[in-house]
Amino acid sequence: MSTKKKKGMNLPNRLTVLRVCLVPIFIVIMMLPASVLPPMVSGLIGVALFIAAAVTDLLDGKIARRRGLITDFGKLMDPLADKFMVIGALAVILYRTDPGFFRFFITLVLLIVIFRELAVTSLRLVASTSAGAVVAANILGKIKTVVQIVFIGAVFIEPALYSIPFVEGFLPAWWVANVPVTYTAGILTVLFTVWSGVNYFIIMWKYLDPEK
């Protein structure tokens, strides 16, 4: 009597699930009050967790393509995990940022990212329910995610880097005060977030039947 071997979740999908699990841990640690954990310590732990999540994002796609392990679960959950990671990180940054222009800038980026992700997720849902189509992330979507991760990393790392006396003394004062890498990455984040969102609408417009 033969028994069928149960297939478990493959490695890329496990990495995706791990990324989803890291997000709430990252958020909780970054939002702990100073009386529980000093901001510098929570920031370092948070950055480490965010980098770990970003590494799983890099690995799961590469492994899936190399080993032919692309699944519908991965097509759905991989971009969803990215959304959780990016939106969660931006919300935490907003929470930890003092009032001022930078807080306004972060708020603007966060709203654009949320509106784009809601629109694209709704389109994916319509495509899935009406046509049974699972639309995987395209190259613009991947670039958008990479730029968002670079921006979030810059928000955490650039000010800390400039606080090192040797680095601060080497750079012009206006450069240190204005964190240009962070702002440049933020502008690119807005650009690619909007561009990739419009591109998804163009690709998936055929699934939107106004007569149904």
Image (tube, rainbow, N blue to C red):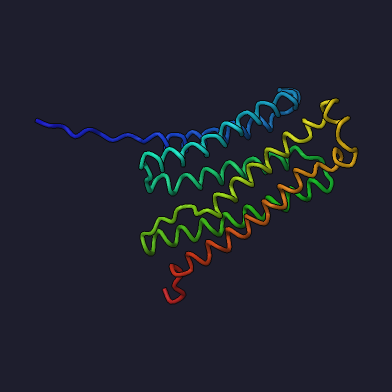
Where's the N terminus, which quadrant? Answer: top left
Please tell me in which quadrant of the rendered image residue 82 appears.
top right
Q: Does residue 91 appear left or right of residue 208 in this picture?
A: right
Residue 157 in percent (x, y) is at 73, 33
Q: Residue at x 61, y 44 (%)?
A: 86
Residue 68 in percent (x, y) is at 35, 42
Q: Residue at x 84, y 26 (%)?
A: 166
- Outermost residue on the bottom side: it is 211
- Outermost residue on the left side: it is 1
Q: Residue at x 63, y 52 (%)?
A: 113
- Outermost residue on the front side: it is 170
Q: Residue at x 79, y 44 (%)?
A: 180
Please tell me in which quadrant of the rendered image residue 22 appears.
top right
Residue 194 in percent (x, y) is at 63, 59
Q: Nearer the viewer, residue 184 or 133?
A: 184
Q: Does residue 46 appear left or right of residue 168 in this picture?
A: left
Q: Does residue 209 appear left or right of residue 164 in this picture?
A: left
